Amino acid sequence: MATSPSYPTSFLSGSKHIVVCGGGVIGACTAYFLSQKPQTSVTVVEKSSPACAASGKAGGFLALDWCDGGPMSSLARASFKLHKSLSDKFNGEEVYGYRAVTTLSVPVLSERVASSSGSSLRGSNLLPDWVDGETARPAKQIGTTETTAQVHPRLFTQTLLSASEAKVIKGEVETIIVENGHATGVVLKGNKEVIPADAVVLALGPWSSRLSLISELFSVSGLKAHSIVLRPAEPDRITPHALFLSYQPAPGAKMLDPEVYPRPTGEVYICGMSKDAEVPEDPESIIGETESIEMLHKIAGTVSSHLKRDKVAEVIAEQACFLPCTDDGLPVIGELPGVKNCYVATGHSCWGILNGPATGASLAELILEGKSTTVDLKPFTPARFVKRRTRLGI
Ligand SMILES: Cc1cc2nc3c(=O)[nH]c(=O)nc-3n(C[C@H](O)[C@H](O)[C@H](O)COP(=O)(O)OP(=O)(O)OC[C@H]3O[C@@H](n4cnc5c(N)ncnc54)[C@H](O)[C@@H]3O)c2cc1C
């Protein structure tokens, strides 16, 4: 059989070298599941540091059945189960804060809305004691310890990446080398040398569209979201309850829907306040806007006296990051049409931490065995954009 002399030697020897571009949760999970297959070596290229972006600053909330009724259902269900087995394998409870949680939906009135409505009905017996804000209203349970859980996203990503034993290179992927319709290597910015590859995985989150191979087919935009991390003075009082709030800052104002995740470390993570914004080149330069951060502090202090900044809760982080979003709201997982051995995994929006494991496991099967058995990847194929572009005459 004739082979191109420029293919890496591993291709000829039967073992495979796969280059994963991007060290977020999707890249880390893909590297881990690839590494579990025989005769495979993995290199991860990350332009900043692993989990520096959304994968380190997310909430880490996991839900079994919240994606039911749509194409993401099987991905989410498989991933929720994989999270449990990964936690068993890596002692996730100790190592990266995996635990089951009870999840509540809690309407919270701002003081202005409460005084204008004259309503004074506080809480319900579903609310844990630490949710002691006078304006919290009766809660509804929306997840049980069987159906909802959490991880610390940065620690989870780092654990999987280190378990993959991948070689991690710090560098910015500039181009994918394509020869005779096959991806054969990766070139880094400022470096002429090619990193040879039998297959390339592009897991670049909201930076995906910066590679022309991707932007020629589909776009990935970034939605900026803010978060704060607090350490209450009495962490033992905070129970494992995840809260999905609805909060109206002023009468007639738009409802906000922040989320509150106490962590086993004693810290409490609160996120929300999303908006369209330009994704900056450097992930480390992403900072939160003062107004949004202040609003999260205000909401935290309204929900619980334990979360009032400075007086009783130390501020650990005030930050922002970008959700990677596609035009049709679905992740893109699969081989790029017209470029053999070049795979993409992105667009996980607000469920990337949940769906990282099943994405990585399915992609590893597709790359090395030709077909995914963990999850049917058809709904996520990049080829759907070819049909769309043809339909639109682009
Ligand atoms: C506030 C907030 C809360 C969230 N909460 C949850 C949650 O509770 N549960 C959940 O399931 N999901 C949650 N998410 C969503 C989740 O964080 C994302 O879906 C997920 O992190 C995306 O992972 P990723 O690996 O695709 O992208 P990223 O984490 O953005 O990683 C992409 C990586 O690629 C690198 N990179 C970019 N360009 C290059 C290049 N040219 N060369 C080399 N490297 C490059 C970047 O430096 C970055 O490290 C949340 C997101 C936000 C913003």
Image: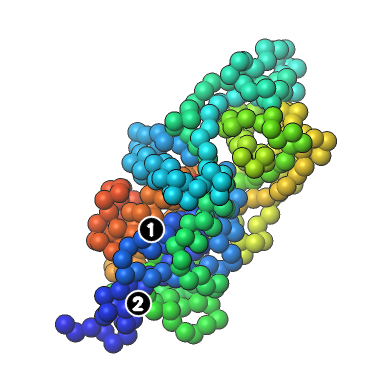
Quarter of the image with the N terminus is bottom left
The image position of residue 319, as x and y in percent, is 67, 50
Give the residue at the far left of this rendering.
1
Point 62% across, 65% down: residue = 282
Is disc 2 placed on a helix, strand or loop?
strand
Give the quadrant of residue 382.
bottom left
Point 64% across, 50% down: residue = 320
Left or right, 81 with reference to 266: left
Would you place residue 198 above or below residue 294 in this image? below
Would you place residue 57 above or below residue 40 in this image? above
Point 56% across, 49% down: residue = 95
Instruction: Say which of 129 and 181 sits in front.
Output: 129
The span from disc 1 to disc 2 (Cα, nearest Å) is 21 Å
Judged by depth in the image, the label closer to the viewer, 1 or 2, is: 1
Quarter of the image with the C terminus is bottom left
Is disc 1 placed on a helix, strand or loop?
helix
The image position of residue 349, as x and y in percent, is 48, 47
- Indicate yes or no: mark 1 CB to ligand 1 under 8 Å: no
Instruction: Say which of 73 and 325 sits in front.
Output: 73
The image position of residue 256, as x and y in percent, is 62, 33
Instruction: Give the amino acid at mark 1.
Output: Phe
The circle on residue 184 is 2
Q: Are marks 1 and 2 in contact (CB under 8 Å)?
A: no
Instruction: Give the amino acid at mark 2.
Output: Thr
Q: Which residue matches tag 1?
A: 33
